[in-house]
Image (cartoon, rainbow, N blue to C red):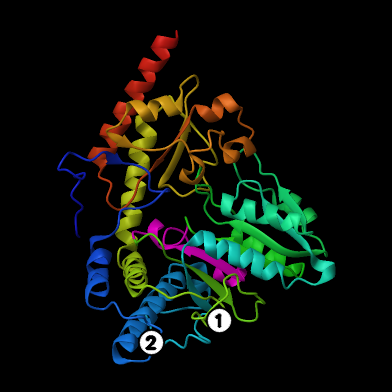
Amino acid sequence: MARLVREAPGGVSAPIYLDYQATTPLAPEAAAAMRPWLETGFANPHSSHRLGREAAAAVEMARKRVLEALTSPHSSRAKSRGAGTEPSDAPLDFARDERVGGKLFFTSGATEAANWALKGAAARLPADRRRIVTIATEHACVLDTVEWLGRQGFDVDVVPVREDGLVDLALLEARVDGRTGLVAAMLVNNEIGVIQPVAALGALARSRGAWFFCDAVQGFGRVPVPLESCDMVALSAHKVHGPKGIGALWVRDGTPLDPLLHGGGQEGGLRSGTLSPALCVGFGEAARLLAERETEDRIRIERLWEAARTTLPGWTLNGSAEQRYHGNLNLRREGIDAARLISELRQIAFSAGSACASGSGRPSHVLAALGLSEREARSSIRLGFGRYTTEEDLLQALALIDDAADRQLSFAA
């Protein structure tokens, strides 16, 4: 296994990194795979000359690897269909791939993918189906897009969650009616790590004749993605040890979708913009590693989770303890100021919630949806760990966090 050297620019010791939900360290293998395409393989992959065709071939191989990771045997879909354990060598037909029943379009990231899925599908909804249902704990790229669609005349319904962060299926069933054309739900929450019952949510949407979009950014490669229940799925490279600036939208065959970006139609005639072979290759290599390291990564996460849970007994877990991804630990301790804690502990990189909203100064909408008070939300921290986190580093960081919290409380007494 390639190891990351924990050294910051300038040669100083880097902080212990515990913010895996914000972004993951770039895998050394992905960085190495990208380098030739940044230097000598710089041609436009949409050009017809030899260098362009070589770049295009690299893009298509990357697309194949992401698709294989999305539909790998550890996913519920692959298990249900008895898929083998070896990746297929069949050539990928971008226009239509019978192996997955859909197409994978590269995007600039998951935010573009979510915007495209929601706006593109909404644009095709018939007049009697202009109702959109989503969940209160969704990522801002979904909630803000749905809010925008509401201002365009769509009927928007944001369904609350229980105090454990999970949606009540009976409540959602009552809210998704015959007027609903689109349902959106996140697989693994980026702030509290709870796993929504996406397979059931997608089946419910389908039973009502609605399209189902899943933000699988935090779940891809970590928990099974129930692709058979989804019509559109958003992915991001930098959450799985790939580069920033690239994501993907998987679209099931037959799902109506208008373009979000107009221009050359480089991606299947639906998504315009010149692709970066380097970014695509980095995403593809990161996706390949997901399958190669699946067991090792899972064992590491479970070991780190157990170590963390037994080390911080005085902290309260936010969100379901059972139905969650164990690489996300969202905790609160009565009376502490999380922002102050983060500022004091510069030798640790951790957060108080979503990096996308950290500059707003507002408490987390996810924690508020769980019923936490503003005080409780501001007393909460998020610790994210993964492939390159050592148990020694994690335990050292937890001891420092707990000691700093003790000092805060002693000063306040």
Q: Which image quarter is the C terminus in?
A: top left
Q: x, y percentage for residue 176?
A: 77, 59
In this view, 306 is above or below 88: above
Report the residue marked by disc 2.
47
- At a point 64% along the width and 39% down the height, the residue shown is 369
- At a point 34% along the width and 75% down the height, the residue shown is 277
Residue 144 located left or right of residue 285: right
Crowd tier of the residue under label 2, counting other residues whose Cα lies within 10 Å: few below 14, some 14–19, many 20 or above: few
Q: x, y percentage for residue 306?
A: 36, 40
Q: Is residue 229 magenta?
A: yes
In this view, 121 is above or below 327: below
329 or 106: nearer the eye? 106
Query: What is the span of residues highlighted in magenta in the rendered image?
Result: 219-241
Q: In which quarter of the view is residue 38 placed?
A: bottom left
Three-letter amino acid code of the residue under disc 2: Ser
Report the residue marked by disc 1.
101
Q: Secondary structure at mark 2?
A: loop
317 or 67: nearer the eye? 67
In this view, 175 is above or below 267: above
Three-letter amino acid code of the residue under disc 1: Gly
Residue 402 visible, this angle: yes
Q: x, y percentage for residue 292?
A: 30, 68
Crowd tier of the residue under label 1, counting other residues whose Cα lies within 10 Å: few below 14, some 14–19, many 20 or above: some
Residue 216 visible, this angle: no
Residue 359 circle label? none
